[in-house]
Amino acid sequence: MQTTVPFKKKPFRLAAIVMPILITQVALYMITFFDILMTGRYDTYHLAGVTIGSSFWVPVYTGLAGILMGLTPIIAQLVGARRNDEVKYSVQQGLYVSIVLAGVVFLIIRYGVSPILESMPLEDEVRVVAANYLEAMSLGLFPLFAYTVLRCFFDALGATRVSMAIILLSAPLTIFTNYLLIYGNWGFPELGGVGAGYAAAITYWLIFFIAFGTAWKHSSFSQYRLFNKWGRPSFIRWKEILFIGVPIGIAIFVETSIFSAVTLLMSNYSTTVISAHQVALNFSSLLYMIPLSISMGVTILVGQAVGAGQFRDAKQYSFLAVGLAMAFSTLAITILLIFREQIAALYTTDVQIIGLASQFLIYAALFQLSDAVQAPVQGSLRGYKDVNMTFIMAIISFWVIGLPVGYLTATFTDLGPYGYWVGLIVGLTIGAITLSIRLLHIQKRHIKK
């Protein structure tokens, strides 16, 4: 089959889609980044509390929000097949699903987190900060999930610059409200780590209102009439969204929860070790934004190509995405190994935490190559709507293999807390290899058709 875009132009098209996604992801990440950074400058106990709170928040939110990401390949394939009139109904049903998911997360935070915190060997001040931080952030759950639906709509159309612009407008607000509410400046109450939770909730409401107004009024999107003739909840369309989205959400939850599980296991060590671990994990998460953005971009391009029946294009975009991510991983490894002490010093002035975090960052460097393969391969598989193998392998590679290896290494070797990071590296590597084999099989099957 003839390709619709010459191969030499594909890298530029991929870059045009990925760069706005990257800026968007980094800006979203900065909300948590500045929570950790500014809380760390405030107080070590509050830093530990926000760290523990984030370890609950991130996997729960990203896992359930990942269900909504099933909309991206659905809408992308509709656009590729020129079935634009069906886009509105998918978005509307996605918003219904987002309300349900926001309610689920709210109930989990309200009633499920406190008993777990009570059972953990945490200092009382750390436990209180963690619980209050999560309750404050939960005030922004509904707008955050609803925004995720609208972002999937923008991105599936290839309009990734819109999501970028929305986040860039709102990200500075997080820093400013953190400044007011964490430290009690300009007459505002001094809330410490809890203030970071309120600041995040305020930001989530802002980005939702901006996204809603853009989808409603902007000429590029008003033609889809997303909010006209609002349909009733349709469980048939919910089934389509959930059939694709649930495996995506489970896979994301499994991947993020493994890092949170490691953080919770770190509670057996000192507050200093917890803080150092979080510093290293926080910065490595920043670096992960690039392969993650490439993954999200290639989902869009592969989805559109598959919807249009251009399977050779889909295959070429998949390989270009992996190559781009691997090129970046080389740079990331270099940065982590050379500047790890300077990176740790950005988060805290505590010399002991800086020393421990510098060691954790060595292991973070080893993540990079596996991440560079796994993330874009996952994105390509989602573009094909092939999502079940992803979550199966995520469970096996991280929880069946990675976490036990980490626990055994941490418990029975001299590596101590660093042993958990060894387990994470093993899980990432196994996942990257097996999913690559799956992608090659799917590509071969589609091209034969």
Image (cartoon, grey):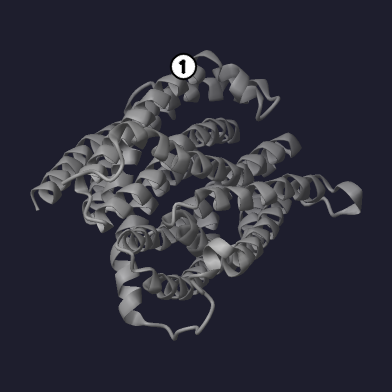
The residue located at (52%, 35%) in the rendering is: 286
Q: Position of residue 247 (x, y in %)?
A: 30, 59
* Residue lying at 27% horizontally and 32% vertically, measured from the top left: 429
Write down the quadrant of residue 385 in the picture. bottom left
Q: Is residue 296 left or right of residue 105?
A: left
Residue at 65%, 30% in the rendered image: 347
Amino acid type indicated by mark 1 = Thr
Please say whether residue 155 is visible from this viewpoint.
yes
The extreme top residue here reads 338
Task: Mark yes or no: residue 428 visible.
Answer: no
Q: Residue furthest right?
A: 187
Position in image of residue 303 (x %, y %):
31, 53
Residue 398: quarter of image? top left
Q: What is the crowding at mark 1: few (fewer than 14 residues within 10 Å), some, or many (at least 20)? A: few
- Give the side of residue 433 with respect to residue 21, left or right: left
Q: Is residue 210 left or right of residue 222?
A: right
- For this rendering, which residue is in front, 276 or 188? 188
Question: Element type at marker 1?
Answer: helix
Residue 40: where, in percent of width, then height?
Answer: 68, 36
Judged left or right of residue 268, residue 255 is: left
Q: Residue at x 27, y 58 (%)?
A: 307
The answer to whether residue 134 is above or below residue 353 is: below
The number of discs equals: 1
Please determine whether, in this image, residue 254 is positioned above or below residue 216: above
Residue 18 location, x and y as percent?
A: 45, 41
**Residue position marked by numbered label 1 in the rendering:** 334
Q: Nearer the viewer, residue 89 or 403?
A: 89
